[in-house]
Image: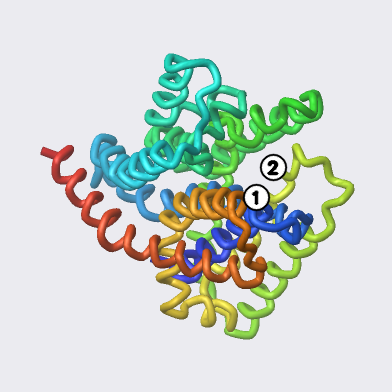
Protein backbone atom coordinates (compact mmCIF):
# COMPACT_ATOMS: atom_id res chain seq x y z
CA UNK A 1 0.00 0.00 0.00
CA UNK A 2 1.22 3.51 -0.84
CA UNK A 3 0.06 5.61 2.10
CA UNK A 4 0.39 8.97 0.36
CA UNK A 5 -1.97 7.92 -2.43
CA UNK A 6 -4.45 6.55 0.11
CA UNK A 7 -4.43 9.94 1.84
CA UNK A 8 -4.88 11.74 -1.46
CA UNK A 9 -8.07 9.72 -2.00
CA UNK A 10 -9.52 11.37 1.10
CA UNK A 11 -8.45 14.85 0.00
CA UNK A 12 -10.09 14.43 -3.38
CA UNK A 13 -13.19 12.94 -1.78
CA UNK A 14 -13.36 16.17 0.24
CA UNK A 15 -13.26 18.11 -3.02
CA UNK A 16 -16.24 16.14 -4.31
CA UNK A 17 -18.00 16.83 -1.00
CA UNK A 18 -17.30 20.54 -1.42
CA UNK A 19 -18.64 20.43 -4.98
CA UNK A 20 -22.00 19.22 -3.63
CA UNK A 21 -22.28 21.62 -0.70
CA UNK A 22 -24.07 24.12 -2.96
CA UNK A 23 -27.18 22.07 -2.11
CA UNK A 24 -26.90 23.52 1.40
CA UNK A 25 -25.89 27.13 0.75
CA UNK A 26 -25.16 29.36 -2.25
CA UNK A 27 -21.79 30.22 -0.69
CA UNK A 28 -20.54 27.00 -2.27
CA UNK A 29 -22.01 27.80 -5.67
CA UNK A 30 -18.65 29.08 -6.94
CA UNK A 31 -15.94 27.77 -9.23
CA UNK A 32 -13.56 27.02 -6.35
CA UNK A 33 -15.96 24.48 -4.85
CA UNK A 34 -17.91 23.24 -7.88
CA UNK A 35 -14.73 22.41 -9.80
CA UNK A 36 -14.26 19.72 -7.17
CA UNK A 37 -15.73 17.24 -9.64
CA UNK A 38 -12.09 16.77 -10.69
CA UNK A 39 -11.96 14.40 -7.73
CA UNK A 40 -13.75 11.80 -9.85
CA UNK A 41 -11.12 12.09 -12.60
CA UNK A 42 -8.45 11.63 -9.96
CA UNK A 43 -10.16 8.47 -8.70
CA UNK A 44 -10.29 7.00 -12.23
CA UNK A 45 -6.61 7.65 -12.93
CA UNK A 46 -5.68 6.42 -9.44
CA UNK A 47 -7.74 3.29 -10.05
CA UNK A 48 -5.66 2.44 -13.13
CA UNK A 49 -2.45 2.99 -11.17
CA UNK A 50 -3.48 0.98 -8.09
CA UNK A 51 -5.00 -1.92 -10.01
CA UNK A 52 -1.81 -2.20 -12.09
CA UNK A 53 0.30 -1.84 -8.92
CA UNK A 54 -1.57 -4.66 -7.18
CA UNK A 55 -2.36 -7.02 -10.04
CA UNK A 56 -0.25 -6.52 -13.18
CA UNK A 57 2.69 -8.60 -11.95
CA UNK A 58 0.41 -11.24 -10.48
CA UNK A 59 -1.38 -11.66 -13.81
CA UNK A 60 1.90 -11.74 -15.72
CA UNK A 61 3.20 -14.50 -13.43
CA UNK A 62 -0.13 -16.40 -13.51
CA UNK A 63 -0.55 -15.98 -9.75
CA UNK A 64 -4.17 -14.86 -10.10
CA UNK A 65 -7.01 -15.81 -12.42
CA UNK A 66 -9.50 -13.52 -14.11
CA UNK A 67 -12.25 -15.04 -11.99
CA UNK A 68 -10.43 -14.34 -8.71
CA UNK A 69 -9.73 -10.76 -9.83
CA UNK A 70 -13.32 -10.09 -10.84
CA UNK A 71 -14.66 -11.65 -7.64
CA UNK A 72 -12.39 -9.37 -5.61
CA UNK A 73 -13.65 -6.33 -7.52
CA UNK A 74 -17.32 -7.34 -7.19
CA UNK A 75 -16.81 -7.82 -3.46
CA UNK A 76 -15.27 -4.37 -3.32
CA UNK A 77 -17.89 -2.26 -5.08
CA UNK A 78 -21.27 -4.01 -4.96
CA UNK A 79 -22.14 -4.46 -1.26
CA UNK A 80 -21.92 -0.77 -0.37
CA UNK A 81 -23.40 0.26 -3.71
CA UNK A 82 -26.47 -1.88 -3.09
CA UNK A 83 -26.77 -0.72 0.51
CA UNK A 84 -26.67 2.96 -0.44
CA UNK A 85 -29.00 2.32 -3.39
CA UNK A 86 -31.67 0.88 -1.09
CA UNK A 87 -31.16 3.71 1.39
CA UNK A 88 -31.65 6.19 -1.46
CA UNK A 89 -34.84 4.37 -2.45
CA UNK A 90 -36.10 4.51 1.14
CA UNK A 91 -35.33 8.23 1.31
CA UNK A 92 -37.21 8.84 -1.92
CA UNK A 93 -34.21 10.26 -3.75
CA UNK A 94 -35.74 9.33 -7.08
CA UNK A 95 -39.18 10.57 -8.10
CA UNK A 96 -41.35 8.31 -10.26
CA UNK A 97 -42.05 10.40 -13.36
CA UNK A 98 -43.73 7.90 -15.68
CA UNK A 99 -45.16 5.19 -13.49
CA UNK A 100 -43.93 1.98 -11.91
CA UNK A 101 -42.46 0.45 -15.06
CA UNK A 102 -40.29 3.52 -15.68
CA UNK A 103 -39.17 3.45 -12.06
CA UNK A 104 -38.27 -0.23 -12.34
CA UNK A 105 -36.16 0.39 -15.47
CA UNK A 106 -34.19 3.08 -13.67
CA UNK A 107 -33.81 0.92 -10.58
CA UNK A 108 -32.52 -2.10 -12.51
CA UNK A 109 -30.05 0.09 -14.41
CA UNK A 110 -28.70 1.42 -11.11
CA UNK A 111 -28.73 -2.00 -9.48
CA UNK A 112 -26.59 -3.52 -12.25
CA UNK A 113 -24.38 -0.43 -12.68
CA UNK A 114 -25.40 0.09 -16.30
CA UNK A 115 -27.18 3.42 -15.81
CA UNK A 116 -24.19 5.54 -16.90
CA UNK A 117 -24.33 4.04 -20.40
CA UNK A 118 -27.68 5.77 -20.93
CA UNK A 119 -26.97 9.46 -21.74
CA UNK A 120 -29.94 10.81 -19.82
CA UNK A 121 -29.53 12.54 -16.47
CA UNK A 122 -32.64 10.89 -15.04
CA UNK A 123 -30.81 7.57 -15.54
CA UNK A 124 -27.18 8.21 -14.67
CA UNK A 125 -27.99 10.51 -11.73
CA UNK A 126 -30.98 8.56 -10.42
CA UNK A 127 -31.18 7.30 -6.82
CA UNK A 128 -27.72 7.73 -5.22
CA UNK A 129 -26.19 9.76 -8.05
CA UNK A 130 -22.45 9.38 -7.17
CA UNK A 131 -22.81 5.68 -8.01
CA UNK A 132 -22.60 6.50 -11.74
CA UNK A 133 -18.82 6.43 -11.35
CA UNK A 134 -19.02 2.79 -10.25
CA UNK A 135 -20.34 1.96 -13.73
CA UNK A 136 -17.02 3.24 -15.05
CA UNK A 137 -15.03 1.30 -12.47
CA UNK A 138 -16.93 -1.86 -13.38
CA UNK A 139 -15.90 -1.48 -17.04
CA UNK A 140 -12.29 -0.80 -16.03
CA UNK A 141 -12.19 -3.97 -13.96
CA UNK A 142 -13.77 -6.00 -16.75
CA UNK A 143 -11.17 -4.77 -19.24
CA UNK A 144 -8.07 -4.90 -17.06
CA UNK A 145 -7.11 -8.60 -17.49
CA UNK A 146 -7.36 -8.18 -21.27
CA UNK A 147 -5.11 -5.12 -21.15
CA UNK A 148 -2.26 -7.03 -19.47
CA UNK A 149 -0.69 -8.28 -22.77
CA UNK A 150 -0.65 -4.68 -24.03
CA UNK A 151 0.62 -3.31 -20.71
CA UNK A 152 3.69 -5.58 -20.87
CA UNK A 153 5.01 -3.20 -23.51
CA UNK A 154 4.44 0.37 -22.36
CA UNK A 155 4.84 1.63 -25.93
CA UNK A 156 1.79 -0.34 -27.05
CA UNK A 157 -0.19 0.89 -24.06
CA UNK A 158 0.90 4.44 -24.79
CA UNK A 159 -0.23 4.11 -28.42
CA UNK A 160 -3.65 2.83 -27.34
CA UNK A 161 -3.95 5.72 -24.89
CA UNK A 162 -2.88 8.36 -27.44
CA UNK A 163 -5.26 7.09 -30.14
CA UNK A 164 -8.20 7.01 -27.72
CA UNK A 165 -7.25 10.44 -26.35
CA UNK A 166 -7.17 11.99 -29.83
CA UNK A 167 -10.54 10.47 -30.71
CA UNK A 168 -12.02 11.73 -27.46
CA UNK A 169 -10.76 15.29 -27.93
CA UNK A 170 -12.17 15.36 -31.47
CA UNK A 171 -15.48 13.93 -30.27
CA UNK A 172 -15.68 16.49 -27.48
CA UNK A 173 -15.18 19.32 -29.94
CA UNK A 174 -18.20 18.28 -32.01
CA UNK A 175 -20.57 17.44 -29.14
CA UNK A 176 -23.44 19.88 -28.40
CA UNK A 177 -23.29 21.53 -24.99
CA UNK A 178 -26.47 19.81 -23.83
CA UNK A 179 -25.01 16.33 -24.41
CA UNK A 180 -21.49 16.66 -23.01
CA UNK A 181 -22.24 15.31 -19.52
CA UNK A 182 -23.95 12.18 -20.80
CA UNK A 183 -21.28 11.36 -23.38
CA UNK A 184 -18.03 12.62 -21.84
CA UNK A 185 -18.45 12.88 -18.07
CA UNK A 186 -20.34 9.76 -17.02
CA UNK A 187 -20.00 7.36 -19.96
CA UNK A 188 -17.75 4.43 -18.95
CA UNK A 189 -16.38 3.94 -22.48
CA UNK A 190 -15.19 7.53 -22.82
CA UNK A 191 -13.70 7.47 -19.30
CA UNK A 192 -11.56 4.40 -20.06
CA UNK A 193 -8.56 6.59 -21.10
CA UNK A 194 -8.45 7.92 -17.51
CA UNK A 195 -7.87 4.36 -16.36
CA UNK A 196 -5.29 3.76 -19.11
CA UNK A 197 -3.46 6.91 -17.97
CA UNK A 198 -3.21 5.39 -14.50
CA UNK A 199 -1.83 2.14 -15.92
CA UNK A 200 0.78 4.13 -17.84
CA UNK A 201 1.73 5.99 -14.68
CA UNK A 202 2.37 2.67 -12.97
CA UNK A 203 4.83 1.80 -15.77
CA UNK A 204 6.63 5.08 -15.07
CA UNK A 205 6.55 4.49 -11.32
CA UNK A 206 8.01 1.01 -11.80
CA UNK A 207 11.00 2.59 -13.55
CA UNK A 208 11.46 5.46 -11.10
CA UNK A 209 10.96 3.74 -7.74
CA UNK A 210 14.53 2.44 -7.62
CA UNK A 211 16.08 5.82 -8.45
CA UNK A 212 18.11 7.62 -5.82
CA UNK A 213 15.94 10.68 -5.18
CA UNK A 214 16.87 12.75 -2.14
CA UNK A 215 14.33 14.16 0.32
CA UNK A 216 15.10 17.64 -0.99
CA UNK A 217 14.53 16.65 -4.60
CA UNK A 218 11.40 14.74 -3.63
CA UNK A 219 10.04 17.77 -1.79
CA UNK A 220 10.65 20.03 -4.79
CA UNK A 221 8.89 17.55 -7.09
CA UNK A 222 5.90 17.25 -4.74
CA UNK A 223 5.52 21.01 -4.24
CA UNK A 224 5.83 21.56 -8.01
CA UNK A 225 3.10 18.98 -8.66
CA UNK A 226 0.78 20.72 -6.18
CA UNK A 227 1.51 24.11 -7.77
CA UNK A 228 0.80 22.73 -11.26
CA UNK A 229 -2.46 21.17 -10.14
CA UNK A 230 -3.60 24.40 -8.46
CA UNK A 231 -2.71 26.39 -11.57
CA UNK A 232 -4.88 24.11 -13.70
CA UNK A 233 -7.64 24.08 -11.08
CA UNK A 234 -7.87 27.79 -10.38
CA UNK A 235 -7.39 29.18 -13.88
CA UNK A 236 -9.96 27.34 -15.98
CA UNK A 237 -12.29 30.17 -16.95
CA UNK A 238 -11.43 29.95 -20.64
CA UNK A 239 -11.44 26.14 -20.82
CA UNK A 240 -14.72 24.58 -22.01
CA UNK A 241 -16.21 22.32 -19.37
CA UNK A 242 -16.32 19.34 -21.71
CA UNK A 243 -12.48 19.16 -21.63
CA UNK A 244 -12.33 19.77 -17.89
CA UNK A 245 -14.43 16.67 -17.34
CA UNK A 246 -11.38 14.51 -18.12
CA UNK A 247 -8.54 15.26 -20.54
CA UNK A 248 -7.77 18.77 -19.27
CA UNK A 249 -6.75 17.35 -15.89
CA UNK A 250 -4.74 14.36 -17.11
CA UNK A 251 -1.39 16.19 -16.90
CA UNK A 252 -1.69 17.75 -13.41
CA UNK A 253 -3.29 14.63 -11.93
CA UNK A 254 -0.57 12.45 -13.49
CA UNK A 255 2.19 14.66 -12.11
CA UNK A 256 0.53 14.65 -8.69
CA UNK A 257 0.16 10.88 -8.66
CA UNK A 258 3.66 10.02 -9.79
CA UNK A 259 5.33 12.53 -7.47
CA UNK A 260 3.50 11.26 -4.38
CA UNK A 261 3.73 7.59 -5.32
CA UNK A 262 7.52 7.85 -4.84
CA UNK A 263 7.03 9.07 -1.23
CA UNK A 264 10.33 10.93 -1.14
CA UNK A 265 9.45 14.45 0.00
CA UNK A 266 8.31 16.32 3.08
CA UNK A 267 4.67 16.54 1.87
CA UNK A 268 4.60 12.75 1.59
CA UNK A 269 5.62 12.51 5.22
CA UNK A 270 2.68 14.74 6.12
CA UNK A 271 0.31 12.67 4.00
CA UNK A 272 1.48 9.48 5.70
CA UNK A 273 -0.26 10.65 8.88
CA UNK A 274 -2.43 7.79 10.17
CA UNK A 275 -5.56 9.96 10.39
CA UNK A 276 -5.31 10.91 6.71
CA UNK A 277 -4.61 7.29 5.74
CA UNK A 278 -7.76 6.17 7.59
CA UNK A 279 -9.61 8.95 5.76
CA UNK A 280 -8.42 7.43 2.51
CA UNK A 281 -9.52 3.97 3.60
CA UNK A 282 -13.07 5.19 4.30
CA UNK A 283 -13.18 7.43 1.21
CA UNK A 284 -15.30 4.95 -0.77
CA UNK A 285 -17.94 4.97 1.97
CA UNK A 286 -17.60 8.74 2.31
CA UNK A 287 -18.10 9.18 -1.43
CA UNK A 288 -21.24 7.05 -1.63
CA UNK A 289 -22.80 8.32 1.60
CA UNK A 290 -22.14 12.05 1.50
CA UNK A 291 -24.67 13.26 -1.05
CA UNK A 292 -27.82 11.71 0.35
CA UNK A 293 -26.86 13.08 3.78
CA UNK A 294 -26.50 16.55 2.27
CA UNK A 295 -29.73 16.22 0.28
CA UNK A 296 -31.66 14.90 3.28
CA UNK A 297 -30.51 17.86 5.35
CA UNK A 298 -31.32 20.31 2.54
CA UNK A 299 -34.83 18.83 2.27
CA UNK A 300 -35.33 19.13 6.03
CA UNK A 301 -34.07 22.72 5.98
CA UNK A 302 -36.59 23.67 3.27
CA UNK A 303 -39.50 22.51 5.40
CA UNK A 304 -38.19 24.00 8.62
CA UNK A 305 -38.43 27.50 10.02
CA UNK A 306 -35.19 26.90 11.89
CA UNK A 307 -32.22 27.98 9.78
CA UNK A 308 -28.66 26.96 10.67
CA UNK A 309 -25.77 28.92 9.15
CA UNK A 310 -23.67 26.89 6.71
CA UNK A 311 -20.47 27.41 8.73
CA UNK A 312 -22.17 25.45 11.51
CA UNK A 313 -24.23 22.94 9.53
CA UNK A 314 -21.51 21.91 7.04
CA UNK A 315 -18.93 20.92 9.71
CA UNK A 316 -21.64 19.01 11.61
CA UNK A 317 -22.77 17.21 8.44
CA UNK A 318 -19.16 16.45 7.58
CA UNK A 319 -18.61 14.85 11.00
CA UNK A 320 -21.81 12.82 10.61
CA UNK A 321 -20.69 11.58 7.19
CA UNK A 322 -17.24 10.66 8.52
CA UNK A 323 -18.82 8.76 11.43
CA UNK A 324 -21.19 6.91 9.09
CA UNK A 325 -18.26 6.15 6.79
CA UNK A 326 -16.18 4.72 9.64
CA UNK A 327 -19.09 2.52 10.74
CA UNK A 328 -19.69 1.45 7.15
CA UNK A 329 -16.05 0.63 6.48
CA UNK A 330 -15.36 -1.39 9.63
CA UNK A 331 -18.75 -3.03 10.20
CA UNK A 332 -20.13 -3.43 6.68
CA UNK A 333 -17.59 -2.99 3.88
CA UNK A 334 -14.80 -5.16 5.29
CA UNK A 335 -17.00 -7.99 6.60
CA UNK A 336 -19.11 -8.11 3.42
CA UNK A 337 -16.01 -8.01 1.24
CA UNK A 338 -14.65 -11.06 3.03
CA UNK A 339 -17.97 -12.94 2.93
CA UNK A 340 -18.59 -12.37 -0.75
CA UNK A 341 -15.09 -13.42 -1.73
CA UNK A 342 -15.49 -16.57 0.33
CA UNK A 343 -18.90 -17.28 -1.18
CA UNK A 344 -17.99 -16.64 -4.83
CA UNK A 345 -14.63 -18.40 -4.68
CA UNK A 346 -16.17 -21.70 -3.56
Residue for point 59% across, 55% down: 304
Q: Is residue 240 visible in the rendered structure shown here?
A: yes
**Are there few (<14), some (14-19), or many (20+) residues within 10 Å of tag 2?**
many
Q: Secondary structure at mark 2?
A: loop
Residue located beneath label 1 in the image:
37
**Are there few (<14), some (14-19), or many (20+) residues within 10 Å of tag 1?**
many
The residue nearer to you, when weighing 187 against 55, is: 187
Residue for point 75% across, 33% down: 169
Q: Quadrant of the C terminus?
A: top left
Residue 217 falls left or right of residue 148: right
| Figure quadrant of residue 175 | top right
Residue 99 falls left or right of residue 39: left
Mark number, residue 11 = none
Residue for point 52% across, 29% down: 95
The residue nearer to you, when weighing 175 against 15, is: 15
Q: Is residue 179 above or below residue 57?
A: above
| Figure quadrant of residue 324 | bottom left
Residue 261: x and y, percent?
52, 66
Residue located beneath label 2 in the image:
245
- Please name which of the two marks, 1 or 2, marks the residue nearer to the observer: 1
Q: Is residue 203 visible in the rendered structure shown here?
A: no
| Figure quadrant of residue 113 | top left
- Tell me whether circle 1 and circle 2 mark residues in contact (CB < 8 Å): yes
Q: Secondary structure at mark 1?
A: helix
**Gap between marks 1 and 2, in whole Å?**
8 Å
Residue 345: x and y, percent?
15, 40
The residue nearer to you, when weighing 143 against 281, is: 281
Q: Quadrant of the N terminus?
A: bottom left
Amino acid sequence: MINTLTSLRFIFALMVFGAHCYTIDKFFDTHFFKEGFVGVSFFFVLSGFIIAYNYQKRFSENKITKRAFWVARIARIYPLHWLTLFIAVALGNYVIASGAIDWLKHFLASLTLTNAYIPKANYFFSFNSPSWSLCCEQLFYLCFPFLIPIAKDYKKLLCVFLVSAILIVIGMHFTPETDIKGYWYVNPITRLPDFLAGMLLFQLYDRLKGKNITAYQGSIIEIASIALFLAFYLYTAEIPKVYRYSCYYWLPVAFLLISFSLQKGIVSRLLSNRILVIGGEISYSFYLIHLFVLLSYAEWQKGSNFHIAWYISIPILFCIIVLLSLLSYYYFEKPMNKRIKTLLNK
